[in-house]
Amino acid sequence: YPAYTTSAGWLGYSDEKIRRLCREAKIEGFTHIKMKVGSDLQDDIRRSKLIREEIGYDIKLMMDANQKWDVDEAIENMKHLSKFQPWWIEEPTSPDDILGHAKIAQAVKPIHVATGEHCQNRVVFKQLMQANAIGICQIDSCRVGGVNEILAILLLAAKFNIPVCPHAGGVGLCEHVQHLSMIDYLCISGSMENRIIEYVDHLHEHFKDPVVIKNGKYIVPNLPGYSIEMKKESLESYDFNSGSVWKKRKQRLK
């Protein structure tokens, strides 16, 4: 299942590191790369130019503001960033501002507005879709109320013809959401067009059946379940207060 990487686009990286990570992402087969924006417009423009120099325009670039802008600020800033042809702008403003997202979505076309990682139920997603406020639906499978709620949102997205590109990257979230995206493909949407899963390369070593990425794609797991069973040694090491990790931290504080 197609994946995208956020690893090259974090704020605070040196130019050299950004360039290196972009080149590595291309070698690893990723066709979609996401970068963070929102803290400083001029720096966002500079970093966007740098990333496009490395990846060209055959690879899709997405931008994520992490709710840093108000509505008018988002519209104005995206006027300046639009020349880098981002596929979407993620969380441009407060996640529960339905009408704000609708105003942004109308103003920044053909760039899509993507949001959903902080939405907690199908009703908020329904309102976003009814208001034409999003072009990309980003479910966070740990934030909404279970598998039934996720299935309801997948069905809503299919009804409104909106691709689902789930949020991932948290501890075990990449492991979890791959199954739900594959369910969407097999049972609901029947399409992988404009559908991708976020991939962040960290903390997978704590799971018995970690995700496998090959040529920029999630490989279907061989084992049953949601792939989120953690290793015993990791649970014991990070057990609050009594695990070895916490004991070492307490020692450093003495």
Image (cartoon, helix red, strand yellow):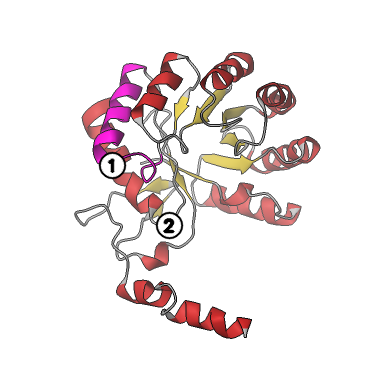
Look at the image and tell me in which quarter the N terminus lies.
top left
For this view, does 29 lie left or right of residue 120?
right
Q: Main secondary structure of the magenta part?
A: helix
The C terminus: image quadrant: bottom right
The quarter of the displayed image where residue 191 is located? top left
**Res. 190 visible in picture:** no
State the count of labels: 2
Is 18 rendered above or below residue 155? below
Which residue bears the numbered disc 1?
A: 146
Mark drawn on residue 154: none
Residue 132 at x, y = what percent? 48, 15
**Can you say whether 172 is above or below 181 in the image?**
below
What is the quadrant of residue 154 in the picture?
A: top left
Q: Give amino acid for label 2.
A: Val
Occupied quadrant, residue 223: bottom left
Is residue 209 rendered to the left or right of residue 32?
A: left
Residue at 46% from the left image edge and 27% from the top image edge: 136
What residue is pinned by disc 2? 171
- Residue 125 visible in rendering: yes
Q: Horizontal and vertical percent for residue 30?
A: 50, 44
Q: Is residue 126 above or below residue 59?
A: above
Whether the magenta-drawn stretch holds residue 159 is answered as: yes
Q: Which residues are magenta?
A: 140-160
Number of residues whose C-alpha sits closer than 10 Å to that of mark 2, classed few (under 14), some (14–19) or many (20 or more): some
**Mark 2 falls on what kind of element?**
loop
Q: Position of residue 46 (x, y in %)?
A: 78, 39
Answer with left or right where residue 84 lies relative to residue 216: right
Residue 27 located within the stretch drawn in magenta: no
Please name the amino acid that badge 1 sits on. Answer: Gly
